[in-house]
Image: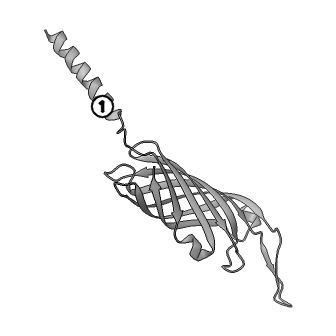
Amino acid sequence: MKKNYLLLIILFAFYSVNAQNETDPYQKNNEVKLNALAPLLQSFQINYERHLNNNSSLGLSFYYVFDNTKNEKDLNYSISPYYRRYFGKKYASGWFVEGFGMLASTDGKKIYTSDDHSIYTENPDVINFALGAGGGWKWVSKSGFLFEANVGYGGIIINADKTDHTIVAKFGLSVGYLF
């Protein structure tokens, strides 16, 4: 008799664990976002994110600067993969932290001459790589529209000596759609 109860408890435990792993058939795992702040900086940023489960996701961000002479940014473009961990109660929303890598093209070191106050760059384009961390908050509606605010900070670990900067920063106010 005790064996039957034990077998019943074990089967119930496996069934309940399996039920927790089942996903909602209407659950959406992909999202695309545009950074609404990027056009103000004469640039464009698009993000793709794939949700692995309720609390984590992998993403890829592409950032392109149209004209870096007007906003005096050294960045030309960047590609940034990231991993996020969510702490909200809803599926892949609420507060999050992220770790990211950033492969970027930046202008080389600027050299200033004191006689005529002219500026020229030593290396026109330098490809560098940075690692960093960030955080933010995401809100998702029932229909799949989303709003996100994020900020991140990191350090250049490859080719930092060939540019004027040793740090990278990323920030955004993004709107997108979950599908």
Residue that label 1 marks: 19
The front one of 178 and 114 is 178
Compared to residue 28, the image places residue 32 above or below, namely below
Residue displayed at 77% across by 69% down? 108
Compared to residue 69, the image places residue 104 above or below, namely above
Residue displayed at 45% across by 45% down? 29
**Drawn side of residue 66 relative to residue 132, left or right:** right
Residue displayed at 57% across by 76% down? 40
The front one of 139 and 6 is 139
Disc 1 crowd, CA 10 A, few/some/many (<14, 14-19, 20+) = few
Does residue 137 appear anywhere in the picture? Answer: no
* Percent of width and height locating residue 121: 81, 74
* Percent of width and height locating residue 126: 77, 63
The amino acid at mark 1 is: Ala
**Drawn side of residue 63 relative to residue 3, left or right:** right
In the figure, residue 26 lies in which quadrant?
top left
Does residue 57 appear anywhere in the picture? Answer: yes
In the figure, residue 79 lies in which quadrant?
bottom right
Compared to residue 175, the image places residue 3 above or below, namely above
* Percent of width and height locating residue 78: 66, 60
Compared to residue 55, the image places residue 42 above or below, namely below
In the figure, residue 41 lies in which quadrant?
bottom right
**Drawn side of residue 34 relative to residue 111, left or right:** left
